[in-house]
Amino acid sequence: MGPFAHDDKITPVHVAALAGGVGAGKFLRGLVRAVPAERVTVVVNTGDDIRVHGLHVAPDLDSVTYWLAGVADRDRGWGRSGETFRATGELRALGAAGAWFGLGDLDLATHLFRTGLIDQGATLSEATAAIASRFGILARVLPMSDETVTTRLGVLDEAGRPLDLHFQEYWVRRGGRDRVKNVRFDGADRARAAPGVLESLAGADAVLFCPSNPIASIGPILAVPGVRDALARRRTSVAGVSPIVGGAPLRGMADRLLPAAGVEVSAAGVAEHYEGLLGGWVIDERDAAMAARIRVRGVRVAVTDSIMVDDGAAERLARVALRVAGAPA
Ligand code: GDP
Ligand code: CA
């Protein structure tokens, strides 16, 4: 390339992204190909964090970290590729209370390290930065808050009995079999956004909602005081990618949580759920017929193939999202 050649990564935009786990991880791998990673700040859901065997486990922070580092298990979706589960097997044999939550042996090292840092006085943000740096991640990875916010579900079990469950008890321990009646984010009203979160949402050239579960992943982030206001104030350069394609999530339980929150399970339903926060919305070709319904709400709509089969597809999707957010891409 000559001195004046155009490098497609040179556009000096800063991007902030709201992220859950796997859908976000895949998307962010594409985003850091479209924008220099140093200019990307990822604000990650911590509502499904849980203490297991005394360890602070942060599933979405770890998914984002592992996907950005290229060490995620692409097929399983969570955890690290090439890991074993010998420690979890042994914990099950011991009858350990938390052994229903499978933790791979490499993943376990992350939780041991994080918990050690926190026990020595580090904040979750500081521990997260240390882990991201160990994995060579150039994007800034931030937990939504350093304080505990917990996603809990009011459900009815098979016999119609009401239960109050941690998100992970609902999804992992009980296999998502209960009927979800309501979702709440305990502690969110008292939580403060982690250092850098509100600043990055206000200061970025574009803010993107990753294709993440709108209730379980984006919901807790939006429940942190200040986040909604920060987005609403700059709404025209906020855009998102629909995690619902053809009337269903590609994976996960969004189809069970959205109705409990009174939201239609569709690309348009999710856009309406984010009303007032979005300037642009990316939907899949399969949902093209919904574009008009979203546009009448004053939201710009881009229609594209949104299935991230590989990093190239994720990069194309990220560029579409940046354009619909009004950022040069
Ligand atoms: P979790 O915490 O691992 O459940 O992850 P997220 O909340 O980030 O992701 C779950 C959502 O990602 C689901 O609603 C999926 O439909 C969505 N998702 C996963 N892969 C893709 C994809 O390739 N394209 C789109 N548009 N959505 C995806
Ligand atoms: Ca999650």
Image (cartoon, helix red, strand yellow):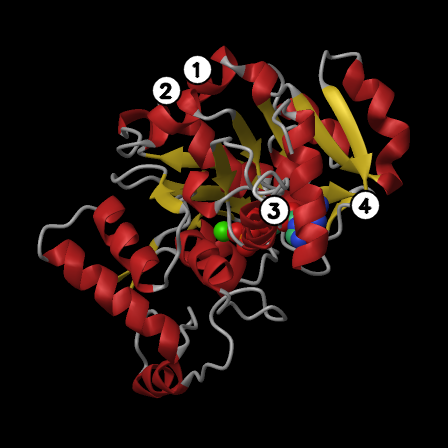
Q: Earlier in the sequence, mark 2 or mark 4?
A: 2
Q: Is mark 1 within 8 Å of ligand 1?
A: no
Q: Is mark 3 within 8 Å of ligand 1?
A: no
**Residue 259 locus on image (x, y percent):** 67, 35
Q: Closer to the camera: disc 2 or disc 4?
A: 4
Disc 4 designates what residue? 305
Q: Write the residue at 55% across / 71% down.
A: 73
- The answer to whether mark 3 and mark 4 are in CB contact below 8 A is no
Q: Is residue 287 visible?
A: yes
Q: Earlier in the sequence, mark 3 or mark 1?
A: 3
- The answer to whether mark 1 and mark 2 are in CB contact below 8 A is yes
State the residue in front, 18 or 15: 15
**In the displayed structure image, the side of residue 1 where residue 79 appears, left or right:** left
Q: Earlier in the sequence, mark 3 or mark 2?
A: 3
- Which type of secondary structure does the marked residue at label 4 adopt? loop
Q: Residues within 10 Å of mark 2 (few under 14, many from 20)?
A: some
Disc 1 designates what residue? 229
In this view, the residue farthest toward the left is 120
Give, as a three-letter code, the residue at label 3.
Gly
State the residue in front, 154 or 61: 61
Give, as a three-letter code, the residue at label 4.
Asp
- Which type of secondary structure does the marked residue at label 3 adopt? loop
Structural distance between the alpha carbons of marks 3 and 1: 44 Å
Disc 2 designates what residue? 226
Give, as a three-letter code, the residue at label 2.
Gly
Q: Earlier in the sequence, mark 1 or mark 4?
A: 1
- The answer to whether mark 2 and mark 4 are in CB contact below 8 A is no
